[in-house]
Image (cartoon, rainbow, N blue to C red):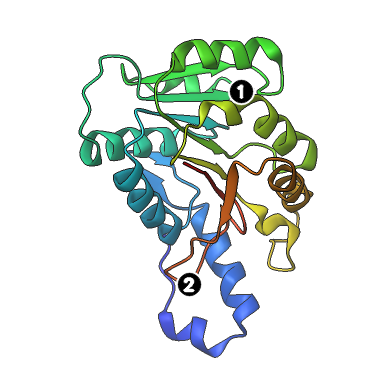
Amino acid sequence: MRLKNIQAGVDRSMADYWRDRLAQHHLDHYKGRTLAKLPEDLRVYQHVIEETQPQVIVELGTYAGGAALWFEDQLRTLCQWVDERPSVITVDTTLRGASVASPSIAFVHGDLATDGVAAEVHRLVDGRQAMVVEDAQHTDACTTAALTLYADLVGPGHYFVVEDAIVDTPLALEGWIGGGVADAIDRFVSEHGEFTQEHLSPYGLTMHFGGWLKRNG
């Protein structure tokens, strides 16, 4: 993991500092696998998991598998329930996530926007209290599909987290693929009054602008 001198972030413009942080987060690892999340966002996740006590986390977009392993450990550490079924269900179109060997993690291979994949995820959740984390393509179409097909898994008091709306801001890294995440979130919230858009960035930095959606109740 590359470390940056804190003073460098103070001397440069805030935009440059943000972009350095975003570039660095791709270099972070957990249990030997890339964990592409800011530590500030990971800390918020810890607070949310401890507060809401989800029984299962549905991760839409596995990437290298580091986040699935991290979520598994947070659930084991912070939650009070005991369940022999998988506590993390992770979905991806590539097969990299299939190599994440853990009885607590179920990997679903396929496009999250298809009815078959959505049905399999719902089968694995099996009525348990779920938190959903969408970290897939970061486009309007993908985010809309994720919210449409999986928001019903989130019960009152729990969260659907849409990651990386930062792609729709000037702070995004050059060459990032995506866009339209913020529009998809805004449409969903305007049409679904049962969800409240919370702005959780108590540590000053987040990649998930407007993406912390809490179901009322």
Residue 53, horizontal then vertical, whole percent: 31, 38
Q: Residue furthest bottom?
A: 11
Q: Amino acid type of disc 2?
A: Gly
Q: Residue at x 43, y 68 (%)?
A: 202
Residue on which the image places disc 1: 94
- Regarding residue 177, the answer to whether it shows in the image is no
Q: Is residue 66 above or below residue 202?
A: above
Residue shown at the point (68%, 20%) measured from the top left? 111
Q: Is 54 positioned to the left or the right of 27 in the image?
A: left
From the image, tell me which residue sits under label 2: 204
In the image, taking residue 130 as reference, residue 96 lies left or right, namely: right
Residue 130 lies, in percent from the top left, at 44, 29
* Nearer to us in this view, 215 or 164: 215
**Front in this rendered view, residue 127 or 24:** 127
Residue at 25%, 14% (x, y): give it.
84
Query: Residue 212 placed where, x, y %?
Result: 54, 51
Provide the secondary structure element on which disc 2 rests.
loop
Badge 2 or badge 1: first in the primary sequence? 1
Q: Is residue 27 visible?
A: yes
Badge count: 2
Task: Using residue 52 as the reference point, say whether residue 175 is left or right of it.
Answer: right
The spot of residue 82 in percent (x, y) is 21, 23
Is 72 situated above or below 215? above
Q: Residue at x 34, y 53 (%)?
A: 47
Classify 10 Å Cα crowding around label 2: few (below 14), some (14-19), many (20 and above).
few
Q: Which mark is residue 9?
A: none
Question: At label 1, which amino acid type do we have?
Answer: Thr
Q: Nearer the viewer, mark 2 or mark 1?
A: 2
